[in-house]
Image: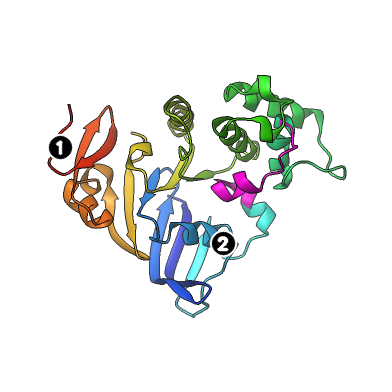
Amino acid sequence: MKKIIELRNVTAFRGEKEIYRNLSLEVVSGCNTAILGPNGAGKTTLLKLLSREIYPKQTKESFIRVFGKERWNIWELRSHFGMISHDLQHRYIESATGLNVILSGLYSSIDTWQHQHFEPADIEKAMKIMEDLAICPLRERCFAEMSTGEQRRFLLGRALINEPDALLLDEPTSGLDIKAAFQYLEIIRRLMQTGRTVILVTHHIHEIPPEISRVILLKNGQILDDGEKGATLTSEKLSHLFEVPVHVAKAHGYFQVLPAGSSAG
């Protein structure tokens, strides 16, 4: 299987603080994976390493490869690897219309600009994506006037217009109400069911869809466990990960945690 991401003996810092020391991790195409950990585990640093916002300490024994390459044109990388993060949502220009949000993915830009050229086929593709995501009626609405869930769908469409090989999602349902969260997860599930590889980075157990087969537990910059979802999301392992006694419940392919001593109704 083609390797989407491969980290070998990676040491990385945020400022003067060491986040990772000799971290090794890989994800292959077709393996839908969740990286789960509490705040401070190193999840944000991992996202920034993969998007080339920060770089690891250089040693002969270490490397980061994305789709088998260590060196990428950053704009080309973002067209192969669709990333939807909170940073992007907060940075996006508020006056951008919905259609322009989708089209901006073709240039990996924030909104569209006069020097950018879009063919009729690009507009048609963007319209089809908005129809698939049920946001076509919002195509002329400004980004700032959308709900959090609507913004999240448009940023997903922005990533999808490049037909990326994989999607990297940063806490996809954070800030969404129950209805919007369920709707968004259904979209993510459909993408996985139709062959898109998804890597989900989160501290919310409940937003790991049934199609996720592998879970990596990350804590203090180290991998505590890595394996099949059912074997990893156990009461004992999650109690250790989050440093609080929890009981794991499962329903319809989803997992949830309750305080230890509680039981699912």
Q: In what quadrant of the picture does the C terminus appear?
A: top left
Looking at marks 2 and 1 on the same chain, the residue that comes earlier in the sequence is marked by 2
The kind of residue tagged 1 is Ser
Q: Residue furthest left?
A: 261
Q: Secondary structure at mark 2?
A: loop
State the residue in front, 120 or 189: 189
Q: Position of residue 113 (x, y in %)?
A: 82, 43
Residue 173 magenta: no
Say the numbered circle drawn on residue 262.
1
Left or right, residue 228 beside residue 115: left
Query: Position of 38 compared to 184: left or right?
Result: left
Q: How many marks?
A: 2
Horizontal arrangement in the rendering, residue 101 relative to residue 29 (left or right)? right
Which residue is tagged 2?
69
Is residue 68 visible to us here? no
Furthest toward the top, the residue is 137
Image point 34% across, 58% down: which residue?
A: 218
The amino acid type found where label 2 is placed reads Lys
Q: Which residues are magenta?
A: 78-97
User: Residue 206, can we see it?
Assistant: yes
Other residues around mark 1 within 10 Å, as few (<14) / some (14–19) / many (≥20):
few
- Badge nearest the viewer, 2 or 1: 1
183 relative to 247, above or below: above
Which disc, if any, is residue 252?
Answer: none
